[in-house]
Image (spheres, rainbow, N blue to C red):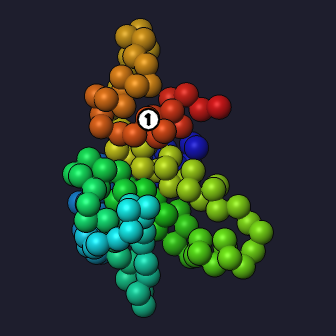
């Protein structure tokens, strides 16, 4: 996790933003919205040497930001990994990659945010304040 925290911190310092959309722009990653099945919030593809993040056009602005950050995490951490191939052709567990992309997303989106421990904020309260899904808040602040 420290490595992911360092990577997100370095990105934010270098580009002076924690917006996944702005970071995609700086990094030459195209972001498009597309009609997708309800069960698919987004994914990334590599076309030749370029990356594209595809986001379901039915998600709201807050969810789109999380999806973009998650997919950017895959691009930065796992750009050479094809999870569809891993799932269908190997016995490797892709949940590790999903967890890492989630950690990347929450660390990126909360870069610079400080929640004092003496405030005794619950995970639900942090999620409500930040508009970041509870699952990601739990991953960062209350890991198992």
Q: Residues within 10 Å of mark 1 (few under 14, many from 20)?
A: some
- What kind of element bears circle 1? helix
Q: Is residue 25 visible?
A: yes
Visible residue check, residue 13? no
Residue most toward the bottom?
Answer: 48
135 vs 81, left or right, is: left
Relative to residue 7, is residue 84 drawn left or right?
A: right
Coordinates of residue 77 in the picture (x, y in percent): 53, 62
Residue at 70 percent of width and 61 percent of height: 93
Can you tell which quarter of the image residue 85 is in? bottom right
Q: Which residue is mark 1?
A: 134
Q: Is residue 90 left or right of residue 137?
A: right
x%, y% of residue 102? 49, 50
- In this view, the residue farthest toward the top is 118
Q: Residue furthest front?
A: 38
Residue 40 drawn at (x, y percent): 42, 64
- Quarter location, residue 80: bottom right
Provide residue 133's location: percent of width, then percent of height.
40, 40
Q: Where 58 falls versus 29 (above or below)? A: above
Instruction: Name which residue lies at 58% across and 43% down.
Output: 1
């Amino acid at each position: 996790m420290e490595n992911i925290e360092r990577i997100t911190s370095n990105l934010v310092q270098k580009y002076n933003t924690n917006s996944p959309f702005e970071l995609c722009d700086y990094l030459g990653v195209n972001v498009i919205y597309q009609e997708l099945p309800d069960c698919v919030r987004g994914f990334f593809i590599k076309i030749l040497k370029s990356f594209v993040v595809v986001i379901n056009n039915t998600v709201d602005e807050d969810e789109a930001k999380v999806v973009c950050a998650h997919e950017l995490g895959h691009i930065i951490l796992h750009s050479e990994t094809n999870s569809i191939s891993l799932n269908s052709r190997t016995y490797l567990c892709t949940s590790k990659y999903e967890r890492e992309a989630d950690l990347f997303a929450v660390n990126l989106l909360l870069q610079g945010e400080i929640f004092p421990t003496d405030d005794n904020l619950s995970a639900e309260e942090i999620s409500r304040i930040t508009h970041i899904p509870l699952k990601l808040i739990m991953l960062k602040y209350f890991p198992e």
